Amino acid sequence: MKRMAIISILCCALAAQTVCAEQTTHHIDIQAGGGIGSLDYRLPEGKVYPAYTWTAGFGYTWYFLPVLGLQTGVQVTRLGSIGALNGDLAAEDMRLDSEGDAYIPHTHYTNWHDTREAYFVEVPLAFRVRWYEGKNRAGLHAAIGAKLSVPVYARHLHLGGTISHYGYYPEWDLTLRDLPDRFTTEEPATEQQQITQTLRRWNAALYAELGTTVRCAVHTEFVIAAYAQYAVTTLAQPEMGNPWAAGLKVGVTLWVGKTAEQKQQQLRKLAAQFPELLEELHPCSELHDTTELKTAH
């Protein structure tokens, strides 16, 4: 009975190691990349364009099945947008000038450009799938999940353009421009304003990744992948919408721990300690053949 139990345990252990024999259960990823993205804020009478984005960080994947694992880590990501504004903006309330006459203030923007950018610390949580071809030298991987992100710094930066102020007097249907100390045209110097405190403290985004891996050394893979993310929460109300980003990442994956092949070798050594059981282990052909080779030498 004891011999049968040992045989069963050894057979099951060897069978469990036959898939992805050269892979380990724990992987560490070090990656960096970039692409385009947007903070998705809104401008009246203007347009918002995507800007460059970058991301860098490290991750950890635990493969609880040969091809399926759970991925997490820490990343730093930069998102930004460029705004272009041309047009008139009218104030909602009327004002009185120095003579006591009522007018509606207007502001005209000409080639006004600004940018908003924000830096986030992100923690992803995703399911990761891997496929390997040939002798496990190259493969594919995919991941899908979510990210929790915290904005650590954000700013609003003026890039260029002019602002003209004028007033419309409805009583006389008259528009006055270029009056000293009242209605002027200005070219503001480049300036920035920190807006970190205006953003939502916690944000969530959906995340997906698809890439390829090439084994370049023992326990080391080169990785290139395309990624995309879309926030399901808005950064702030009412100006900002749902940020998004897409791009490419490159990096390396380090295998941690023993490979399945190394675990097989340990099991073979354990089986060799029970020579009287070797003939009864015949159904485990891989173990039986390996033992015969060792005996021949």
Image: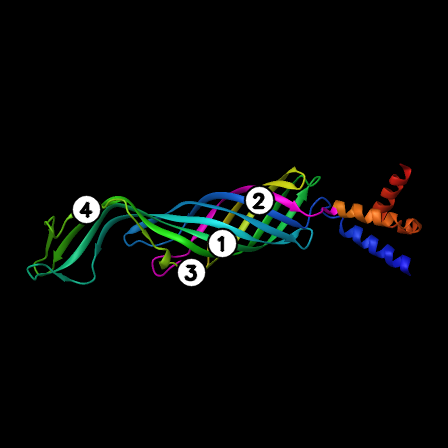
- Mark 3 in CB contact with mark 2 (< 8 angstroms): no
Locate the C terminus and report the quarter of the image it occupies.
Answer: top right
Q: Residues within 10 Å of mark 1 (few under 14, many from 20)?
A: many
Sooner in the amino-acid sequence: mark 3 or mark 2: 3
Horizontal side, residue 125 vs residue 204: left or right: right
Q: Which residue is mark 2?
A: 211
The picture places residue 62, in percent across and down from the top left corner, at 64, 53
Q: Which residue is mark 4?
A: 186
Residue 122 marker? 1
User: Foreground residue, 75 or 247?
Assistant: 75
Give the magenta range. Answer: 233-260
Tag 4 secondary structure? strand
Sooner in the amino-acid sequence: mark 1 or mark 4: 1
Sooner in the amino-acid sequence: mark 2 or mark 4: 4
Scheme of colours in the image: rainbow
Tag 2 secondary structure? strand
Marks 3 and 1, how far apart at CA: 12 Å
Point out the frontmost of discs 4 and 3.
3
Residue 235 covered by magenta stretch: yes
